Amino acid sequence: AQKITQTQPGMFVQEKEAVTLDCTYDTSDPSYGLFWYKQPSSGEMIFLIYQGSYDQQNATEGRYSLNFQKARKSANLVISASQLGDSAMYFCAMSRTGANSKLTFGKGITLSVRP
Amino acid sequence: EAGVAQSPRYKIIEKRQSVAFWCNPISGHATLYWYQQILGQGPKLLIQFQNNGVVDDSQLPKDRFSAERLKGVDSTLKIQPAKLEDSAVYLCASSLVGGPQHFGDGTRLSIL
């Protein structure tokens, strides 16, 4: 079984500063993917970034980067130069590699960006 | 490209009534998912389709929930009869095989 743990309480960051959102995971699958999604108050789930378990380099996507530490089973999201529009819930998720690719989500972290 | 379309956006019904949700995935996406997101939690998979076949429905409460994906494109999710604990947001997602999932805006269901 797969498990995602997000234990940070609500996070606050000053506009234009960087922030790290923590995620740890547990799985017995040898090959898996890690994802981060953003959910604004309007409710849609927006895909941000993906990291494969065998990828040698950490994933980056614009202002988002994923700090993947396989031995520690962590997949933290780093948002650089925070913007007011980054205020939202952030979910870490994982899936097996292959056809049965359902996502297992964590409970999410609320990020608030202060002007 | 057009995203995942879901309707209705909001639905309010009384317990024991029935309700149906509709999803149109991104064109060409063979895999379609229905998730249930209860307030304050992450989404939980209800059912996964690959074309019009079911890949995983292990978490679907089959005594009251049903889903179909005719012709491997659109999908409907039905609840009959609804219970108070079914109040949640129902999210539809689609993906290419092995690709990231793209979500619709969801249907917010309230049971009175």
Image: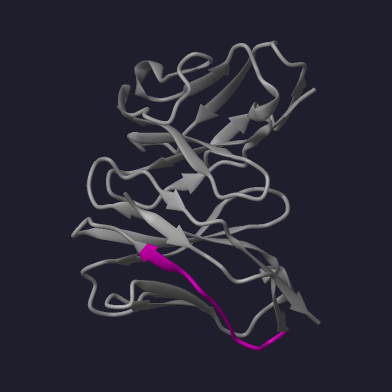
Q: Is residue A74 above or below residue B86?
A: below
Q: Quadrant of the C terminus of chain A?
A: bottom right
Q: Is residue A27 above or below residue A81?
A: above
Query: Magenta segment, which residues?
Result: A15-25
Q: Which residue is pictured at 80% across the width and 22% down the height?
A: B112
Q: Is residue B24 above or below residue A44?
A: above
- The picture places residue A110, in percent across and down from the top left corner, at 67, 65
- The picture places residue B52, in percent across and down from the top left corner, at 32, 22
Q: Is residue B103 visible?
A: yes
- Pick whichever, A36 or A64, lies toward us: A36
Say how the picture is coloured.
one colour
Q: Residue B7 falls in which quadrant of the image? A: top right
- The picture places residue B100, in percent across and down from the top left corner, at 38, 52
- Pick whichever, A84 or B38, lies toward us: B38
Q: What residue occupies the far bottom of the structure in this picture?
A: A17
- The picture places residue A12, in percent across and down from the top left corner, at 71, 78
Q: Which residue is pictured at 64% across the width and 27% down the height?
A: B86
- On screen, residue A36 versus residue B81, left or right, reads left
Q: Which residue is pictured at 52% across the width and 39% down the height?
A: B4
Q: Is A61 included in the stretch rendered in magenta? A: no
Q: Residue A101 falls in which quadrant of the image? A: top left
